[in-house]
Image: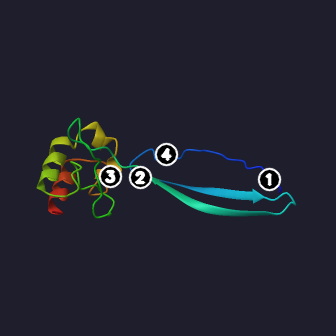
């Protein structure tokens, strides 16, 4: 019985904003007779912005309809007028302003009261 050596590696990929970070993992296996086989697997890591209301909010904000902007501001799993109110009260907060891509409804690169209005219109 022949036992082959196995090399294991660990690495970390992290999204640094509310966007998706893409990477590829290449795995190569070498046989003792010199033959090898490999595979490349795509890896996507998506980072959601934190819930922007309440210190003890149990869940994160969410892009419920997967259109690229976050609707579920209070993290309760639904999009309704309560989320619009929470967005209005917090659109200038660091949690929103540091994650503009997640809350920029008009696509101008910033988050303002205009985005709150557009969110309301999308109800």
Which of pointers 4 and 3 lies earlier in the amino acid sequence? 4
Q: Furthest-right residue in view?
A: 33
At mark 4, the secondary structure is loop
Q: At 74% across and 58% down in the image, what residue appears?
A: 29
Q: Which residue position holds label 3?
A: 102
Q: Which residue is mark 2?
A: 19
**Sequence-wise, which precedes: disc 4 or disc 2?**
4
Asked whether the beta carbons under mark 4 and mark 2 sit within 8 Å of each other, the answer is no
> Which comes sooner in the sequence, label 2 or label 3?
2
Which quarter of the rendering shows the C terminus? bottom left
Question: Can residue 17 be seen?
Answer: yes
Marks 4 and 2, Cα distance to the nearest angstrom?
11 Å
Q: Which residue is mark 1?
A: 3
Helix, strand or loop status at disc 1: loop
Alpha-carbon span between mark 1 and mark 3: 50 Å
Left or right: residue 78 versus residue 38 is left
Residue 7, how many percent across, how many down?
72, 48
**Residue at coordinates 33% horizontally, 47% vertically from top-left?**
100
Residue 109 seen anywhere in this rendered image of the structure: no
Look at mark 4 in the image and give the residue it sits on. 14
């Amino acid at each position: 019985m022949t036992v082959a050596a196995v090399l294991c590696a660990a690495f970390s990929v992290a999204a640094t904003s509310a966007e998706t970070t893409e990477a590829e993992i290449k795995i190569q296996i070498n046989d003792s007779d010199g033959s090898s086989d490999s595979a490349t697997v795509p890896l996507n890591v998506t980072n959601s912005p934190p819930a922007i209301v309440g210190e003890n909010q149990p869940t994160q904000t969410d892009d419920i309809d997967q259109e690229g902007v976050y609707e579920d501001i209070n993290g309760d799993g639904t999009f309704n007028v309560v989320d619009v109110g929470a967005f209005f009260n917090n659109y200038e907060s660091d949690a929103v302003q540091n994650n503009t891509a997640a809350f920029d409804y008009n696509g101008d690169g910033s988050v303002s009261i205009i985005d709150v209005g557009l969110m309301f219109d999308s109800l």
